Image (tube, grey):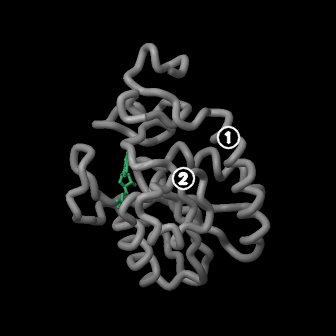
Amino acid sequence: MGTRGRTEPFDILISEKAIQERIVALGAEIDRDLKDGDLVVVGVLKGSFVFMADLIRAIKRPVSCDFIRVASYDHDHSTGVVRLEFDLTQPIADKSVLLIEDIVDTGRTLRFLLKYLQAKRPARIRVASLLYKEINPEVRGFIDYCGFTVPDKYVVGYGLDSEGLYRSLPHIGCRAEER
Ligand code: 5GP
């Protein structure tokens, strides 16, 4: 059990240190790959905002930031429906887009967003996701920059919530009984 596990119903699955080290490496990779032109970093609200805040500071080239919001989960269970709730505030035509996800589970959200954003004719779209659930290997190919692979558990922290809570944890946790 992690130190915070004694006061919260979660064990640490990925430590704060591991997350921060991985983000430094991802930032360097993104700097190497996306050197030229305008780069718009698009965070998928709400879960990606903590990861995005750290990742953009690990990317040394200039970026602009925008957000998009979709609804796909209802009370921690997939409803199977993805709906756009909040759109970008700027055109992305002919620009490079780095889409930031917190976690790719079934890939339904990501597929929807890629199709939606492609229609806006960006020069290219790359995807960074902090987490990827290993039960869905067919969607791994959509992720260009992947932080960590996680088992098929409901995870929280570092932006990810459970009924609106736990986004502010500095690590990724899962319920002790689920480990
Ligand atoms: P997908 O469409 O890939 O099935 O799910 C994507 C969204 O579902 C994520 O952006 C996230 O908001 C939510 N989600 C999926 N798995 C988890 C999980 O284990 N924990 C939390 N907090 N959210 C999840």
Residue type at mark 2 is: Thr
Query: Quadrant where the C terminus lies?
Result: top left
Q: Where residue 71 sits: x, y (%)?
A: 28, 57
* Residue occupying the point 67% across, 34% down: 17
- Which image quadrant is residue 108 in? bottom left
- Which image quadrant is residue 123 in? bottom right
Q: Nearer the viewer, mark 2 or mark 1?
A: 2
In this rendering, is residue 141 above or below 175? Answer: below
Q: Residues within 10 Å of mark 2 (few under 14, many from 20)?
A: some
Q: On the rendered structure, is 72 left or right of 57?
A: left
Residue pointed to by mark 2: 149
Residue type at mark 1 is: Gln
Q: Where residue 54 sits: x, y (%)?
A: 63, 45
Q: Nearer the viewer, residue 112 or 139?
A: 139
Distance, label 2 to label 1, CA atoms, is 15 Å
Q: On the rendered structure, is 148 left or right of 157?
A: right
* Residue occupying the point 68% across, 47% down: 22
Residue pointed to by mark 1: 20
**Total count of labels:** 2
* Residue occupying the point 54% across, 33% down: 171
In this rendering, is residue 129 above or below 152? Answer: below
Q: Where residue 1 sits: x, y (%)?
A: 50, 21
Q: Nearer the viewer, residue 10 or 54?
A: 10
Q: Where residue 4 sits: x, y (%)?
A: 50, 19
* Residue occupying the point 66% across, 39% down: 18
Q: Which is more N-terminal, label 1 or label 2?
A: 1
Q: Residues within 10 Å of mark 1 (few under 14, many from 20)?
A: some
In this rendering, is residue 41 above or below 19? Answer: below
